[in-house]
């Protein structure tokens, strides 16, 4: 599952960006763009995210995923179309078989949302034992 290494790298990039900007807050959310032709299984990335953020500045941060449909452009007539499921890379308008992928390969870190470092993070309430009868 290469999604764990992707999630780990996203955490490293987010941490590096926060530290290089001399920010002291924690990461609240990370927004990424993932193309359907990128080879990334979004459900697996979301699962891996929870493991990758443990004990980091991103712990508790949400992963916001913007999905991008795969699109191709016909080299013969210039028509663009979505690849679809199952993927079809031929031109739907003409018999042209040569197309170029124009969208869907993305795997981009778009933005980070940080907590305000001047506002203390909420601390969980200590667990109280239930009275014994």
Image (tube, helix red, strand yellow):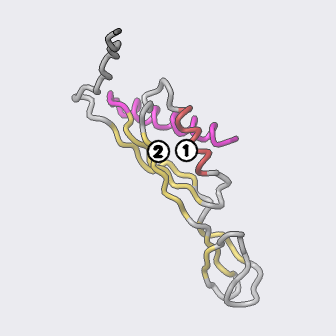
- Pointer 2 and pointer 1: residues touching (CB < 8 Å)? yes
Query: Which percent across, then down, holds residue 59?
Result: 44, 30
Most foreground residue, 15 or 35: 35
Magenta span: 1-26
Q: Is residue 22 magenta?
A: yes
- In the displayed structure, does residue 72 sit left or right of residue 19? right
Residue depicted at x 32% and y 14%: 128
Query: Which percent across, then down, holds residue 19?
Result: 40, 29
Q: Is residue 20 above or below residue 96?
A: above
Query: Which percent across, then down, holds residue 125?
Result: 30, 20
- In the displayed structure, does residue 96 sit left or right of residue 6? right
Q: Residue furthest left?
A: 118
The residue that mark 2 highlights is 63
Most foreground residue, 100 or 118: 118
Q: Is residue 82 above or below residue 122?
A: below
Quarter holding the N terminus is: top right
The residue that mark 1 highlights is 46
State the image quarter where residue 100 is shown: bottom right
State the image quarter where residue 22 is shown: top left
Quarter holding the C terminus is: top left
Residue depicted at x 25% and y 25%: 120
Residue depicted at x 56% and y 55%: 34
Q: Secondary structure at mark 2?
A: strand
State the image quarter where residue 132 is shown: top left
Main SS of the magenta part reads helix
Q: Residue furthest front?
A: 133
Question: Label 2: how many residues lie within 10 Å, few (<14), some (14-19) or many (20+)?
Answer: some
Query: Which percent across, then down, holds residue 96?
Result: 75, 86
Between the C-alphas of marks 2 and 1, the distance is: 7 Å
Q: Is residue 133 above or below residue 112?
A: above
Q: Secondary structure at mark 1?
A: helix
Question: Label 1: how many residues lie within 10 Å, few (<14), some (14-19) or many (20+)?
Answer: some
């Amino acid at each position: 599952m290469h999604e764990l290494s992707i999630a780990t790298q996203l955490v490293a990039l987010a941490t590096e960006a926060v530290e290089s900007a001399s920010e002291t807050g924690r990461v609240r959310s990370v927004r990424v763009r993932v193309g359907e032709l990128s080879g990334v299984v979004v459900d697996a990335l979301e699962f891996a995210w929870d493991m990758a953020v443990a004990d980091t500045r991103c712990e508790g941060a949400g992963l916001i995923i913007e999905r991008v449909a795969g699109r191709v452009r016909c080299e013969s007539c210039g028509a663009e179309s979505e690849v679809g499921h199952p993927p079809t890379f031929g031109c739907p308008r003409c018999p042209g078989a040569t197309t170029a992928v124009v969208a869907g390969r993305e795997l981009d870190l778009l933005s980070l949302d940080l907590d305000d470092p001047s506002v203390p993070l909420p601390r969980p309430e200590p667990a109280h034992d239930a009275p014994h009868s």
